[in-house]
Amino acid sequence: MIRASFHFDSQGRIESFRMEGHARRWRPWPDLICAGVSAIAQTVIGSLGELAGLEADYSLEPGRIACSIVYPDDREKAAIAATLMESARIGCIQIGDSYGEKFVTVVDEPYKG
């Protein structure tokens, strides 16, 4: 199973995400779900730089992708970054809805101050 966790800041924006695991035993194409989740994460990481001008702190390893950002003071860039980070969450929810939570589970981690 892939566990996608999203951590929120004090303003309700996603400041980091981590996607871990594999969607094993899914047939007929077990790598399809993993590739979908990976593509979502990597697209967001690249888009943060291209569209918001932010350098994300990220790591890509087999079975694990993590990304965190520091929101800029520039409101427009911060809004773009927040939208991109939320799109990663939405994409994972949609994959989970399509293929089942036993393959992709989304966990929201609220701000704990």
Image (tube, rainbow, N blue to C red):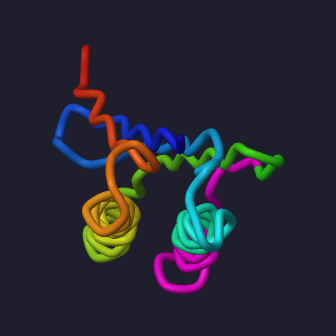
Q: Quadrant of residue 93?
A: bottom left
Provide residue 100's location: percent of width, then percent of height: 33, 54
Q: Residue 94: image x %, image y %? A: 29, 68
Q: Is residue 7 left or right of residue 39?
A: left
Where residue 27 sits: x, y (%)?
Answer: 58, 65
Q: Residue at x 65, y 47 (%)?
A: 22
| Residue 111 pos. (x, y %) | 24, 25
Camera-side residue: 109 or 113? 109
Q: Is residue 17 left or right of residue 74?
A: right
Q: Nearer the viewer, residue 93 or 85?
A: 93
| 77 lies above or below 59 | below
**What residue is rendered at 51% in x and 49% in y?**
69
Count the marks: how many?
A: 0
What is the span of residues highlighted in magenta in the rendered image?
43-59
Left or right, 111 with respect to 56, comes to: left
Q: Please determine whether, in this image, residue 5 is positioned above or below residue 87.
A: above
86 sits left or right of 51 in the view: left
Magenta-colored stretch includes residue 47: yes
Q: Residue at x 78, y 52 (%)?
A: 60
Q: Residue furthest front?
A: 28
Q: Is residue 87 magenta?
A: no
Q: Residue furthest top?
A: 113
Q: Name the foreground residue: 16 vs 27.
A: 27
Outermost residue on the left side: it is 11
